[in-house]
Amino acid sequence: MSVIDLRRLTGVARQQALRIVLIGPPGAGKGTQAATLKERYGLAHVSTGDMLREEVRRQSPLGSQARALMAAGKLVPDALILDMMAQRLQQPDVSRGFLLDGFPRSRAQGEALVAMLAAQKQPLHTVVQLDLQDEEIVRRLSLRRSCPACGRVYHLHSNPPTLHGLCDADGSALVHREDDNEVTIRTRLSVFHEQTEPVIEFFRSIGLLRRVDASLPIDHVEHLVERLIQGALTKSSPLRTSRRLAVSKYRSLGRSLRG
């Protein structure tokens, strides 16, 4: 299936920029797939993890609060994340479409996101879940390295940089993040199962969720994600969905969409 050029789409699909969420446990490959989708569709890549790490780097008040929580593998409170995300989604670069990576991470965040976008008549096209078993995640993350400058993520075994220890994009020295140790990873997985799986069920209940087996080779996962997104672009009507979201009371949201 050929790649859809968003500049050539007609009707509603052209007027409403692509809006998608990548969701899944840490280490499932969200960053890798996000980089590909960003380049292919010209999307703004909105990563709460990157945003929080930037706040930590700047030593802002939010960064000070987030640093200890992130190092322990815990989630930053919803109120802080939602405030940060609301501001981010008002920035000009998201008008051409966006990819959310690492957000929402709780059902409350998911509900708030859908309500926020519905109010703006800019609903999500699809939510792609990258699914991976815990033991494979621990193995992956212990070998993960990332670029502190551009955010690109590598894996020393399955997706190494061309030059050892250096980012392919800008030559920066790669780092092993402080939260990529086994104890913290298992804490993060525990938090994911407890708090993030409910948001996966929420997106499933309103008909947006699509699942991809993230244990497959990277190029296979990329192909499956691409097919899901093209299907969402060609088969859904964002404007009609936005009207349904806008007129429905939130508690009946899932029921109205399934109908």
Image: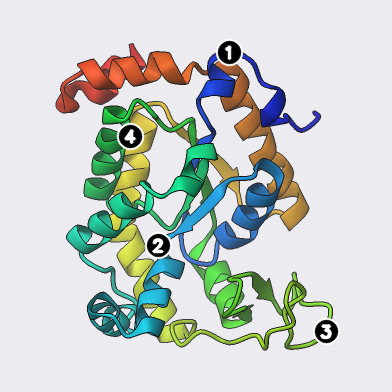
Relative to 12, say whether 6 is above or below: below
Task: Report the disc number at residue 48.
Answer: 2
Q: Amino acid at mark 2?
A: Thr
Q: How many C-alpha atoms fall within 10 Å of the one at disc 2: few (<14), some, or many (≥20)?
A: many
Judge by depth and name the residue closer to the eye, 130 or 170: 170
Q: Earlier in the sequence, mark 1 or mark 3?
A: 1
Select label 4 or label 3 by which is in front.
4
- Look at the numbered disc 3 and give the secondary structure of its residue: loop
Q: Amino acid at mark 3?
A: Leu
Relative to 117, say whether 169 is above or below: below
Residue indicated by mark 3: 163
CA–CA distance in space, label 1 to label 4: 20 Å
Q: Amino acid at mark 4?
A: Leu
CA–CA distance in space, label 1 to label 3: 45 Å
Q: Earlier in the sequence, mark 2 or mark 1?
A: 1
Q: Amino acid at mark 1?
A: Gly
Left or right side of 213 for 256: left
Residue indicated by mark 4: 117
Q: Residue furthest right?
A: 162
- Look at the numbered disc 1 and give the secondary structure of its residue: helix
Asked which quadrant contains residue 205, the reply is top left
Select label 2 or label 1 by which is in front.
1
Judge by depth and name the residue closer to the eye, 204 or 91: 91
Q: How is the image coloured?
A: rainbow
- Look at the numbered disc 4 and give the secondary structure of its residue: helix
Task: Report the disc number at residue 11.
Answer: 1
Q: How many C-alpha atoms fall within 10 Å of the one at disc 4: few (<14), some, or many (≥20)?
A: some
Q: Residue at x 71, y 23 (%)?
A: 8
Q: Residue at x 74, y 72 (%)?
A: 169
| Residue 147 rendering spot, x and y as whole percentages | 62, 78
